[in-house]
Image (tube, rainbow, N blue to C red):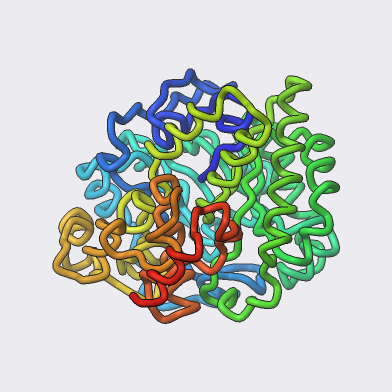
Amino acid sequence: MIDIGKLYCGSHSTGDGLRYGTSSGPDCHGNAPHKVHVLASERKPIVVWNITRSCNLNCVHCYTDSANIKYSGELTTDEGIALIDDLANFRIPSLLFSGGEPLMRKDLFTLIEHASGKNIRPVLSTNGTLIDKNAARTLKESGIVYVGISLDGMEETNDVFRGTKGAFAKAMKGFENCVAVGQRVGLRLTLTKKNFEDLHEIFNFIEREGINRACFYHLVYSGRGENLYDNDLSHSQSRAAMDIILSRTKDFFNRKKDINILTVDNHADGVYLYLKLLEENNPRSEEVRRLLEWNGGGAYSTGVGIANIDFVGNVHPDQFWQDYSFGNIRNRSFADIWMDESDPLMKGLKHKAEYIKGRCRLCRYRAMCMGSMRVRAYRTYSDPWAPDPQCYLTDEEIGLDDETKKRMAKE
């Protein structure tokens, strides 16, 4: 995650200790900040647990290819509680309950409450359509520290992407129900050609509806989203989207609006932000360079700081790589699976600097990004160490001159 407010504007959030090794106070809901880490490499992974594959919607970019059916083999409640105990012993900082649609599991609140009692920060990723008043109150009481509700643009665009008319209205009602009980809640949006054109209106909507956190995700080719290359932003559109995100976040900050804006799944965003600060002769540019290099971008994300467990217990590099499993928690502990570098992909993910190729390896800013998303490289080039195809920085910006390109061509 690239915290735009923190890096571009100098604001603070509870995630500063995890992302940048800096301290911050509790948020407005009283949630304590993440522990401050000395080294990013020491972080235990945030675990995304797809507790079910079932979903009441039919999103065109769903990375789990979920449907409104019952899938066999789901971890039982007892297995889920045992898994949470295992993750607590490994001292993970946060457990993100995802799906499918996690609210379709009747034992969701039991699992959340157990995680909270084990000193794991429970977070929920949901489409929001099933959060009625009772569900919102129970989520709050069970210990959820944050609810992320997914939208994909304004109403018409969202409902097309979600495959269900009325999904937008139901999601917004879920958001209102969370706000009403004092639950920290925000929006998650995947950037595509469809909603890129509405980006200014989305920011107007964020302010108008009193939304205090929004995460803009870059598309990752996985599940049904693997066939959406044509809907992905072009490099010029990615740059234009970042310009809008930066300027609108700065406007919020200048007007003292408490709205946390982040971008996700493309560490090139951090480099682009840094270059903007240099262009503006901003005195904070050196501090931002240091924070981004401390974070390490892709170096400490997939396979290190992010992990995924699917609904049947398979452990994956991240939630977008569910066609590759390191093992199953029904057979081995998560810690044993996660720390075992005998698997060649796991070894490479934990030592990305030694493996990334091409322009990513030669980039002058690789310490800030370290190749970004390896799964996008794999989906595009059948090589997990190839350059990330969504890097929109020019050769000139990353320091690739003619001589360097010749060297790269010979490799």
Q: Is residue 238 visible?
A: yes
Viewer-closest of 213 and 66: 213
User: Relative to 298, is 116 above or below?
Assistant: above
Q: Residue 264: x, y in percent?
A: 55, 51
Q: Say which residue appears at 68% left-offset and 25% top-offset.
A: 258
Q: Can residue 130 be seen in this view?
A: no
In screen coordinates, is 399 left or right of 245?
left
Q: Say which residue appears at 30% left-offset and 61% top-offset.
A: 349
In screen coordinates, is 43 left or right of 3?
left
Q: Say which residue appears at 32% left-offset and 56% top-offset.
A: 80
Q: Residue 363: x, y in percent?
A: 44, 55
Q: Residue 327: x, y in percent?
A: 23, 70
User: Relative to 134, is 82 above or below?
Assistant: below
Q: How many numbered badges does the structure rendering display?
A: 0
| Quadrant that contains the C terminus | bottom left
User: Relative to 314, is 40 above or below?
Assistant: above
Viewer-closest of 107 and 396: 396
> For residue 372, which quarter of the picture?
bottom left
In screen coordinates, is 371 left or right of 277?
left
Viewer-closest of 343 and 398: 398
Q: Say which residue appears at 37% left-offset and 47% top-offset.
A: 46
Viewer-closest of 352 and 37: 352
In screen coordinates, is 93 left or right of 259?
left
